[in-house]
């Protein structure tokens, strides 16, 4: 959630994500627990480096569809996007 909110707020790199997290920790605690505080930018980067790229791409695609009011459907390996009216 930290990376999600920071990215929406135009954080462009791992350091900016860490700074965003520390500046908005009270808000973020409404959604997640941070028993050890906001992780360092190095830790955030290491965690994201082990997440499969296909998962991140799929998640980003689904978020983009929500943001743009479209529906994402899948037929085998082909993604299809339909504008909602």
Image (cartoon, grey):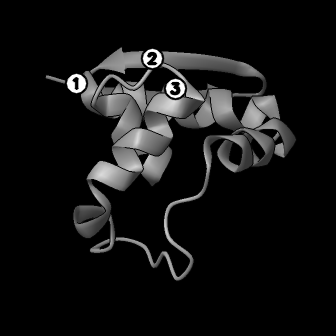
Q: Residue at x 57, y 37 (%)?
A: 59
Q: Which residue is mark 1?
A: 84
Q: Secondary structure at mark 3?
A: helix
Q: Residue at x 40, y 31 (%)?
A: 7
Q: Earlier in the sequence, mark 2 or mark 3?
A: 3
Front residue of 80/45: it is 45
Q: Classify mark 3: residues with Cα within 10 Å, few (<14), some (14-19) or many (20+).
A: some
Q: Quadrant of the C terminus?
A: top left
Q: Classify mark 2: residues with Cα within 10 Å, few (<14), some (14-19) or many (20+).
A: few
Front label number (2 vs 3): 3
Q: Which residue is mark 2?
A: 81
- The answer to whether 25 is drawn above or below residue 55 in the figure is below
Left or right relative to 14: residue 63: left
Q: Residue 58: image x %, image y %?
A: 63, 32
Whether residue 30 is visible to the viewer of this picture, yes or no, is yes
Q: Residue at x 45, y 79 (%)?
A: 33
Contact check, label 1 and label 2, Cβ < 8 Å: no
Q: Which residue is mark 3?
A: 61
Q: Residue 52: image x %, image y %?
A: 83, 38
Q: Secondary structure at mark 1?
A: loop
Front residue of 1/52: it is 1
Q: Residue at x 78, y 29 (%)?
A: 53
Q: Quadrant of the N terminus?
A: bottom left
C-alpha distance separating marks 2 and 3 = 10 Å
C-alpha distance separating marks 3 and 1 = 16 Å
- The answer to whether 42 is drawn above or below residue 31 in the figure is above
The image's mark for residue 35 is none
Q: Residue 66: image x %, image y %?
A: 31, 34
Whether residue 73 is visible to the viewer of this picture, yes or no, is no
Q: Earlier in the sequence, mark 3 or mark 1?
A: 3
C-alpha distance separating marks 1 and 2 = 9 Å
- The answer to whether 76 is drawn above or below residue 42 in the figure is above
């Amino acid at each position: 959630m930290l990376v999600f909110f920071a990215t929406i707020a135009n954080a462009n790199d791992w350091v900016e994500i860490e700074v965003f997290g520390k500046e908005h920790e009270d808000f973020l605690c409404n959604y997640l627990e941070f028993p050890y505080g906001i992780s360092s930018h190095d830790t955030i980067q290491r965690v994201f480096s082990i997440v499969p790229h296909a998962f991140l791409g799929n998640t980003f695609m689904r978020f983009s569809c929500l943001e743009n009011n479209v529906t994402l459907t899948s037929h085998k390996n082909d993604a299809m996007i339909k504008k909602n009216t």
